[in-house]
Image: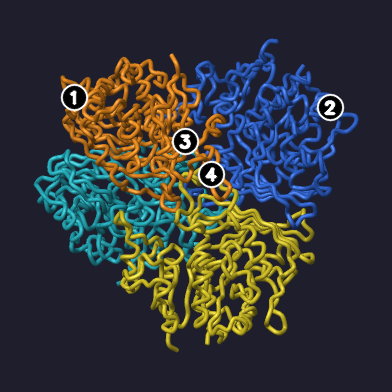
Chain colours: A yellow, B blue, C orange, D cyan
Amino acid sequence: MAKLRAVLIGATGLAGQQFISALKDHPDIELTGLAASPRSAGKSYVEALRASNGMTAWFVPEPLPESVAKLKVMSGEQINAQDYDIAFSAVESDVAKDLEPRLARDIPVFSAASAFRYEADVPLLIPPVNAAHAPLIRAQQKQRGWKGFIVPIPNCTTTGLAITLAPLAEHFGIKSVLMTSLQAMSGAGRSPGVIGLDILDNVIPFIPKEEEKVQVETKKILGTLNAGGAALTPHDVSVSCTCTRVAVMEGHTESVFVSLSRKASVQEVVAAMREWRGAEVARQLPSAPPRWIEVLDEPFRPQPRLDRDTHGGMATTVGRVREDTVLENGFKYVLVSHNTKMGAAKGAILVAELMRAQGLLG
Amino acid sequence: MAKLRAVLIGATGLAGQQFISALKDHPDIELTGLAASPRSAGKSYVEALRASNGMTAWFVPEPLPESVAKLKVMSGEQINAQDYDIAFSAVESDVAKDLEPRLARDIPVFSAASAFRYEADVPLLIPPVNAAHAPLIRAQQKQRGWKGFIVPIPNCTTTGLAITLAPLAEHFGIKSVLMTSLQAMSGAGRSPGVIGLDILDNVIPFIPKEEEKVQVETKKILGTLNAGGAALTPHDVSVSCTCTRVAVMEGHTESVFVSLSRKASVQEVVAAMREWRGAEVARQLPSAPPRWIEVLDEPFRPQPRLDRDTHGGMATTVGRVREDTVLENGFKYVLVSHNTKMGAAKGAILVAELMRAQGLLG
Amino acid sequence: MAKLRAVLIGATGLAGQQFISALKDHPDIELTGLAASPRSAGKSYVEALRASNGMTAWFVPEPLPESVAKLKVMSGEQINAQDYDIAFSAVESDVAKDLEPRLARDIPVFSAASAFRYEADVPLLIPPVNAAHAPLIRAQQKQRGWKGFIVPIPNCTTTGLAITLAPLAEHFGIKSVLMTSLQAMSGAGRSPGVIGLDILDNVIPFIPKEEEKVQVETKKILGTLNAGGAALTPHDVSVSCTCTRVAVMEGHTESVFVSLSRKASVQEVVAAMREWRGAEVARQLPSAPPRWIEVLDEPFRPQPRLDRDTHGGMATTVGRVREDTVLENGFKYVLVSHNTKMGAAKGAILVAELMRAQGLLG
Amino acid sequence: MAKLRAVLIGATGLAGQQFISALKDHPDIELTGLAASPRSAGKSYVEALRASNGMTAWFVPEPLPESVAKLKVMSGEQINAQDYDIAFSAVESDVAKDLEPRLARDIPVFSAASAFRYEADVPLLIPPVNAAHAPLIRAQQKQRGWKGFIVPIPNCTTTGLAITLAPLAEHFGIKSVLMTSLQAMSGAGRSPGVIGLDILDNVIPFIPKEEEKVQVETKKILGTLNAGGAALTPHDVSVSCTCTRVAVMEGHTESVFVSLSRKASVQEVVAAMREWRGAEVARQLPSAPPRWIEVLDEPFRPQPRLDRDTHGGMATTVGRVREDTVLENGFKYVLVSHNTKMGAAKGAILVAELMRAQGLLG
């Protein structure tokens, strides 16, 4: 099977760079087009990254692939969608609003932006959790008259939470969730992102719009595709969050309190997470980790620096699973999820792999 | 009125140093005795701090008062309690178990150690919250045959939580609390405390015994002294915590979810905290801040580095007060409390001031 | 004597805020005018600081003085220089090039910007070091036809170096200096300054233009005013630097290797620094610290967090004075200097105090 | 050729763990014995790491190899040297003094400890720099009557400095070096190593004994083995250092000023480093990187977090090569070297590989 030709929009930003790094050596997808803002258009990618101070603004730890360095950058307007099989989007939400639909008329768009996450005909996919929602794009295509479609991934803070709630919802049912996040700086990007003076020796207890996103997205992801496949019913779990920023490079930590629908023991809860394999179709995807959740027994884990890269940043690590005495059938645990791998570029690529495996790309 | 002569046990550790710094220029208390481990005994205080590598192990930012530097350090055994009016204790819990009762036979002991916090005849005092519990020491004295008594202060993580819950309990009643803490490194002391390699670019999601302490202490502090004054009934609020450590020097941040006993608006909750003045007897104490709680309106506050020193580290700052949709009559907020000021030495001194004001020292 | 009425340009940035904080309660200077960019003009200062996200962008730890909060902000063009006795400048260098001369036509301008530092008729003043250079402004006034003048302060990295070299130059002569700086983040300001993702767990080994500034400024500051008072001869010491950025909030650390003109002992070098009182006229200035240099004997000092605030951030702390075996009559030491106090706003205010004391304002 | 059977002493500490991690999958060496303190003796390695608080004290990022986890730990006394071909030593210097000679009676000992570095018959090896010193062990064996020998590696701060000086010494000659280091926390280990409270928002300007080590070791490493092969003449370069600690996990940064023996251009200096391949015998060693030095052209590099892992932590990265105007034929540059890879365990393994390649093991 030929490799899918992919165009990446928002290629020069930190999120775009993570897509480039994640697509290097991908077995099924080849990055053949790059787009960025008009002031980068016409330059080679490496030139577009060159700042006025002489620095190459390449920020991911892995080196910039040489083949990508030479690619010529287009503006969004210059993209000819027919030249590609799929698009990845790493643009800001306001740019996404215009550009993603234009591409979706012709090709599938897998997006890290929030612009379309809350539309009724747009699934919000985490392959092991809700691969079953993928066919909703048929309704999207029909309704919007598109040949392609838009599938966004969730906010990076939602991802680990939804993944750990999925086995609990399946085995015990879940009624409510209270979560406090300790989020890494990389989630804020670099323009300017989190300023060093603000975060050293400090915690910032507010991330604009983050809590609302997690609260709405979690319910949508855990929801159900209606019989006709044309609409999603959100899960009726109630979710409440407080999101904070800490001096961590990568890896969001979340302190979760959850109320189950029925009695369970700590052992059962741990086993439910540990043995969870998620949707069958997702298990064999090229980017799938051996397990989606790793439950750690050591009391001081998970820690973002030690655990964020578990299974290439694609696994959510969980620890400190205990009973909670406040909520009905309450349990509490701590999770760490890699916000710029499973929670961003690699997560979006996984969705593209899923759609291909499900035969939904054509 | 003559100044109270105070002896400090555990004088060389970080907690002891904070007592020394906090007692400098105190209007009513004079530090006239210092005790530490036998290997310090006989040395002047500044000599006792001198490490083998030539460094003076004085760690609080304010300079070591010269009068204290010259004081000769005793071992615990060498203390003659009759030479002092009160004692402050900054020793570890296992030392406290032996030494504090020995001193309490003769004089009041105000302790930062946890050794006696959970005894039935021992009040756990935060002056604005539960000054009314102070008379329990009469029962303690009677039962134990002591002329003095022991009054510990709560764990530093309990303090800010209990202070912010107090006005809510008074105005609305409280049913349950779920709290996630982001605690500063100073709470762990220096022997070795938190290792740099463990905390940089990281979060440690477990602090041994901390959660149990907060859960039990909060109920005790918010409880009621029985009619006869001989026993405390804990508050029936249920409390559940997850305590984590972050790369912050000083100042614990806590993300709180609370269920009130009756309906309230955000405005009422904010007003309850903002207007709260606490026990009348506590307001005029020398170390009392103008307000015990400062509610900040800015969405990005409170932050530990910016807010921990509010009113000399004696105020708890609160922000992000919002409704919570999960708990019944639920609200959520974030607080910052200075763990080594109001939460430790200065908090214990405040208790000594309270007992004096209540006429309970004699 | 009436207080000097001062206008501050660049009032909303971090450097401007430091001026506001430093001028609070100043005995001789009153801040009566504020200017910033046109988009702030017409607003009250506190409104001008209000960001779109609801945050008040006030970044210095001390609270914003209420009297300043209410002042109406002007654009640079709206300033009527006749309404003020002096001006302080916290603008960027490109703005300084236009605005400072316009003000200097009428009133003295004390500037933290680098725009005029290297002009032949412009003294670069550190009061204890080179108060004798101050009369150069007479030549500046004559040459430029100004009633006022411009006096910039040095780059914050130069300040501590020049101060510690001054007593060595006086006592022993100095031939060459090799310095490596470990600079705090606050020196880079906040727009965006140092990005958290770049500095955590890291060192940045380059600060554009910084090394050249230090190399040139040090020679100028330690130079000599010619007989006629119309020109400065730079000191012939050769200076070579490598400037790096580290994850420190405030306080520049510098590792200095210096070659003296004649033999000396460590004791003599320490004594020269410790006993140095600098220019007599500078000793009694309102902002002068009791000593300009504090030499610490402990081997692990100075440290930026522990020592930057010595004497209100106006003293340079020195430690680890040792012989160096490479350079002729070589010595090496480490210094810490507060880059945003003595090295910025408070340093500029000290210069204004000096000029007033020298009768050079009128 | 059969794999070499290696015993590791000091196996449970951080340095020991780095040896274990570095030896995993080594083509020529198999770790078959582990020794640690008597309280670990008799336990399996993973049990020996289990702390009383339930944590497994395994600190390197890569997982503990399962084959090693099961190995039984010996005390130093229980080692039967005849069971092994070589030994690696990660013990503290005082333990090394006793234990290393006992093993060296029978087998070669490759040590990260400083105990024997300064003995006249002990070479201090960095394979690309001074493989020619290796035969000194024949003199050592003869003199001490050992069948084995001891070869220590240099202090981690010396390594990068000596590597970058080597091509300069070869091409231009070097007369003097002034160096300021900004060292990572991992160099201090974990017992307790650097305390978080000491290093956050701070620099510590002193590392006991470090400067002397670098000054002496650099001269020894760059020295010459006498004709008879029985003694080393140190290089006559003079070296002076100031060593500081910064809040970096891994990777020492060094700011170097060097005086060459003859004139050179920046281009020549860069080329000398960039094209340097070091001793021929070292190039093909299993752990050798493709280049020992990587010179980076970007002005903001090298940075420890971005560059420490270049070529698996075995390359020294260099940047900011400039002329220095103070020293005769002066140049300055910044280097980053991985202190716990090339500067510790992997560096010692490289030395073992070298001795094997040189036929000096038998």
What numbered label is drawn on residue A228? none
Which quadrant, please, contains the N terminus of chain B?
Answer: top right
Q: Indicate the position of residue B240 as horizontal and vertical percent values.
A: 73, 50
Residue A341 makes an appearance in the image: yes
Marks 2,3: beta carbons within 8 A:
no
Instruction: Name the front one of labels 3 and 1.
Output: 1
For mark 2, what is the residue?
A: B139
| Chain at tag 4 | A
Instruction: Name the front one of labels 4 and 2.
Output: 4
**What's the CA distance linking mark 4 and mark 2?**
44 Å
- Seen from the viewer's position, the closer of residues A105 and B294 is A105
For mark 1, what is the residue?
A: C230
Q: What residue type is labelled 2?
A: Ala
- Seen from the viewer's position, the closer of residues B359 and C54 is C54
**Residues at marks 4 and 2, common chain?**
no
**Residues at marks 2 and 3, common chain?**
no
Instruction: Name the front one of labels 4 and 1.
Output: 1
**What's the CA distance linking mark 2 and mark 3?**
56 Å
Q: Indicate the position of residue A134 as horizontal and vertical percent values.
A: 61, 80
**What's the CA distance linking mark 2 and mark 1?**
84 Å
Q: Indicate the position of residue C359 as horizontal and vertical percent values.
A: 32, 16
Which residue sits at x=53%, y=24%? B40
| Chain at tag 2 | B
For mark 4, what is the residue?
A: A202
What numbered label is drawn on residue C17? 3
**What's the CA distance linking mark 3 and mark 4?**
21 Å
- Seen from the viewer's position, the closer of residues C160 and C34 is C34
